[in-house]
Every structure is written in structure tokens, then in C-alpha cells.
Image (cartoon, coloured by chain):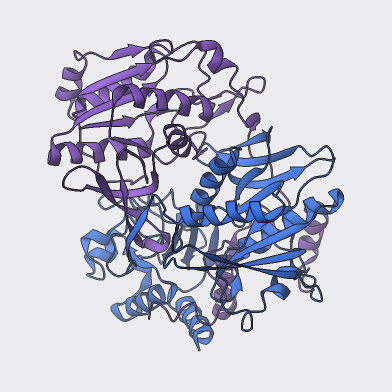
Chain colours: A purple, B blue
Amino acid sequence: MRIMVCVKQVIDVRAPLIVDRRTSIVTAPGTSPVINKADICAIETAMGLKGSIRAEVLAVSIGPAFADRALRYCLARGVDIAWRIWDESIALGDPYIIAEIIAEAAKISHCSVLLCGMASEDSQSAIVPALIAEKLGWPWVNRVVNIKLVENFTGVTVLQRGERGSRLEISCCLPSVLALYPALSGHQYVSARRLRAAERKPIQTYSLTQLGLQSHEVISHKSPIKVKKVRQPKPRTKRTVIASRQVSGEDLVWQMISGTSGKKENDNLARGEPIMLAERILEFLSEKGIFHRTKEFHKREI
Amino acid sequence: MRLGPIWVLVDHSRGQITFVTREMLQDANEAARPLGVQVWAILINGGDPAEEPWDKQIGAFGADYLLRVSVAGFPYLTAEACSFILEELSRQYEKPYLMIIANSIEGQEIAARLAMKWHTGYANDCVSFSIDLKGNVEATRITHGEQLETIVAFSKGPAVISFRPGSAGIGVPTEDRKAKEYSYQMDLTSHKFEQKVEGLLPGDPRKIDITEADFIVACGHGVGTQDDFLILQELADRLGAAVAGTRRANDKGWINIERRVGLTGKTVCPQFYMAVGISGAREHVVGMDTSKVVVAINKDPRAEIFRLAHLGIIGDAKEVMLALLQKLREQAI
């Protein structure tokens, strides 16, 4: 049985980012690219499956030579085979093209399970797993936190993450696409010795032609969604239910300037009587969609 | 050029439409008026029509029509089933020009699946959208770890977007307005889905691993005493949150080591993190600074935790907790 894992190398989004105004290309100067968090979860899950059923694990990444770094990590972690797919005509920012290529790679690899992260940290389009499954005609399960293969490898039972820590146990047939929910911990440490050993392992490079795709087909691919611009977030005005009569003169001026409730962006501190502060917390949680002011809401957990 | 309607998938919780649904409806209404298109609110399994006056709630926030869908033969509605229902509705009624779905854990998946069914584009985690007079749809998405925003344009319809809660705010509802209601019955007993639901395991906030909790109430040294910690525990139970804490809270024996957050504990990334009596020492903050919404309660206005809090409450932790608990108890009566 073969398990394919999709690995994406992304810029470190925790670092200060710079956007090229002309091309909308985003860079993080002074930092090295990192493997997408959810993809690391996919690698860890694949390793867990490999240990239990003796599967062969294949890691696939799309990108120029620098993508080798991510694949070297996968090899050090225990992946058996690494493929890098690259052609100058590939637009790395277009999820529709990426999904098309991954789907072709999955067909060639004859894998039974395709594991990937549910979204990348940079573009956060969260559509690639759905597109891959659509192109392959396979079932897909999103937000996967745990996978168990059924005894004769005809299907898979997964735990899907739900709202508020709940889990849904779902079964579906194989082959299938499983998109992993990013977990922050539980990743195994990869020693420097293993990383060094992985430097000597081969990485197979594939072009589009070798996958059975034509460059001009990929270039002319019509994506239904186009990125127009990437920029630093601009302050947005928000609606307000009604202007309070108790607001101070300063706040009223802010209301006129900003067209909102008169609060500055960093004005997030509240003081006053405890009961008023409690009301402010509930109002804030309600705004964020975390708390619903219904009588029944809190009876559930008690 | 005649455009189709705008559909909004209603996110509801026990008889009330959620804050994000109100935002979506008002935004849809604002986009629809200049174009003369209608806003349809799609409500799946909204309970008994006699008991829940949804038409008034939904109409007040800008929907022209309310389509109540009653689904039988499916115990738990998965994202796959929801997207199937929406696709089915698009065959029975006029296909929407724009579909708006709340950007919740499930909402994202419903939107992605629907985009696949309609062979169209999907914009995830949008904070705003617009339709110009030519019918071009544009949406602004939050990307790159919330540091940047990306403006995308749809070249093919219907456009599907998932809308981030709290990004637009809500205005004054129109009290005397009602949405015209339609009903639609659907039986999914004989339909075969790819996913088969084997069981639902509800998360117990007291037992689940804090790395998986969506809501966390964390305690620090500033909480005070063991009795005050019990108040915090009750508060967490009322909010449906897991309890976590700092190293000092662990040292005092209030929490186990598995519930410690920070450099010497776990790294968490919940939807909501309430830091009570936590100063915000770097050793703790590294374990929770990626939390989506942070509320901090501390009596020291210079506490470091306020730097990353979305809402900072300056006051005595015990008094604020008791007041909050009182409010929650009142709501539960």
C-alpha cells in the first residue's frame, strides 16, 4: 500500500512580511522558508500509518530546487520516496494549477491514500484538497485528526475535528483524500544525524511532461478566481448598533472621523465596575461569534 | 445584465441567529440594494416554525426571503450533506450569484464542497466583498497569518465565499420587516454519501487535551486562592471552556502539568483564550500568542498580557469573575 503526502514549503508568516506592490509577491527577508504546519501533521500521520501497516510513504512537493529542503526533512523523518515536480510554467500561487498537478502525480504514484494539510499558512485558500479529490473523483475528508485503516485496506475510519473539541467518527472507502487539521505539538524530533543522512538520499525530479501534462495547458488554465492585490490590512469601518449618549467628547470626535463606534484600533482596555466589565466581556464574545445570548446556551455543559 | 440572488447560509444556535449571520445578512443587503437583487437566507433544520419566528429575526437584518429546509433521514448533517442540500436547492430555485457562508470550522468545508459542485471559485476567510454594477464580484481575504489581506476577483459565477465573524459589525435592525418565508422538505434516507457517520463524540472541556480545545480559560498567580480558582473552574464550565494555566498555577496545585501553557508546557491555539490573573510573562505568552481571540483580566494596567489581548479588562480578577458568573447564571435561568 502506498501513501502519498503533499508537502508545501511556505514563508515564515510570523516574521515581518514585505509585499512587492507591482507583482504582489510576498517575502520574509532574513528568514528561511518552513514546512507548512498542517503538512507536518500529514507527514507525522503517514509515519504512524507506516509503522502500523508497513505502507510505503511518498512525499511530493512542487517547486524549484529550494523545495528539496522540505523533502530532505521528510526523508529524514522516515519517508521512503521523495518527488519534486517543477516546470517554469507552474504558477505556485494558483491552487487550481497545483491541484491539477498533484492529482496527476497521485494517478502515476498509484497511491491509496493522499494526505495533505487542510490549508497552507501563507495563502490560506483551503481549497486544494477539495480540488484534488474532485479531479481524481475520490472521496475526501477535511479536518482529520486521527486515521485508522480498516483491516483489509478497503476503507478508512477517521476522527474529524468539530466545533468545541467535539469529534465526528467518519468512515469512507479507499482511495481517498484526507486533509489534516494542523496540530501544534506531537511532532517527532528529527536529529541532525538523520538530517545529514537524508542529504545523501535521492530526490526524483519530475517535469510536467513526465506527469502527462503539457506546459501550455497549465499556463492557459482558467482559474475561476484571480488574485488582484496583496497588501497590508487597511482599517475597515464597522457598523455600530447605536451611538451611546454617554460617550465622551473625544469619543464623539473619533466617531465622526472613523464612522464607527469611535474606538481607536488599539483602544482595547476597559475599566469600571465589575458588573459593567462582565457585560463588556459578554458583548465582545457575542461580537466575535463565541458566545450567544440565549437562555439555553449554558445549560448544556452543566 | 440581470444578476441572480445572493444566498446566505444561516448559522444559528438554539433559536437565535448568530452574530456572524447578522453581519452576513446586512452586508448582503448592502451589496444587493444598488443592484436590485434579492437576498435569500437559507435555514437548514431550524426547528419548529411555530416556535421559532425566524422570518422576523432574519428579515430585520436585511433578507427578503427565508427558505426553511427541513431534512429528514439524516441524524447528523455533515458538511458533505449540507453542500448537497444547497446544490439541490440551486436546482429547485434560481441559482445564486453569490453564496455567503460563515467561516466556522464546518462552514469552510461546506463552502469548499459547494464550490466543487458548482465548478466555481471559492474565497476563504473573507472580511468584505463587493459586487460592482457590471456584476464583478471581489472579496478581501485575510492571509499570511493575518498579517496581510488579499483581494481576489471571481471570473466565474456563482461566487462562493466564507465570511469571517466579527469583521463587519452589525447595524440597527429594521424591526418591522419580515422575510417572506418558503419551506422545502428533503428526505436523505435513500441518498448515499461518500462519508458515513459512525458516531459523534462530544468534547468534554474538563477532559479534552488543551491543545485541541477551542475555548480556554487560563489562570495565573493573580487569581488568588484555591477558592477563587473554583470560581474560575465554574466560569470555564459555564462558557464550555477548558481550564489551563501558567507554571505558577501549576506549582500551586490548581492545574495538572498537562494543562500548563508556555515554554515549559504546551502550545495552544484556541479560538478564544481568556487569561485571568496572568501578567503575560514571555515564558507563558510563547505558548498562546497564536490564539485567535484573547481576553485578559488583570488589575495591573501595565501588564504585558494587555499587549496581545483583543480585549483587556483592568480590575480585580475575583470580582470580575464573580460578576461574569452572575451574568451567565442569569442567562441560564
Image x and y of residue A264, in percent = 69, 54
Is B172 above or below relative to B280? below
Is A108 above or below relative to B240? above
Is A189 above or below relative to B201? above
A260 sits to left or right of B319: right
Q: Residue at x 38, y 11 (%)?
A: A210
Image x and y of residue B325, in percent = 46, 81
Depth check, front residue: A148 or A154: A154
| The image quarter in which residue B147 lies | top right
B35 sits to left or right of B104: right
Q: Residue at x 70, y 49 (%)?
A: B96
Furthest-front residue in this view: B190
Q: Residue at x 33, y 66 (%)?
A: B203
Furthest-bottom residue in this view: B333
B112 sits to left or right of A155: right
Image x and y of residue B219, in percent = 36, 66
Image x and y of residue A140, in percent = 39, 43
Depth check, front residue: B246 or B159: B159
Quadrant of the drawing holding the N terminus of chain B: top right
Q: Is residue B164 visible?
A: no
Q: Is residue B81 visible?
A: yes
Q: Residue at x 62, y 46 (%)?
A: B161
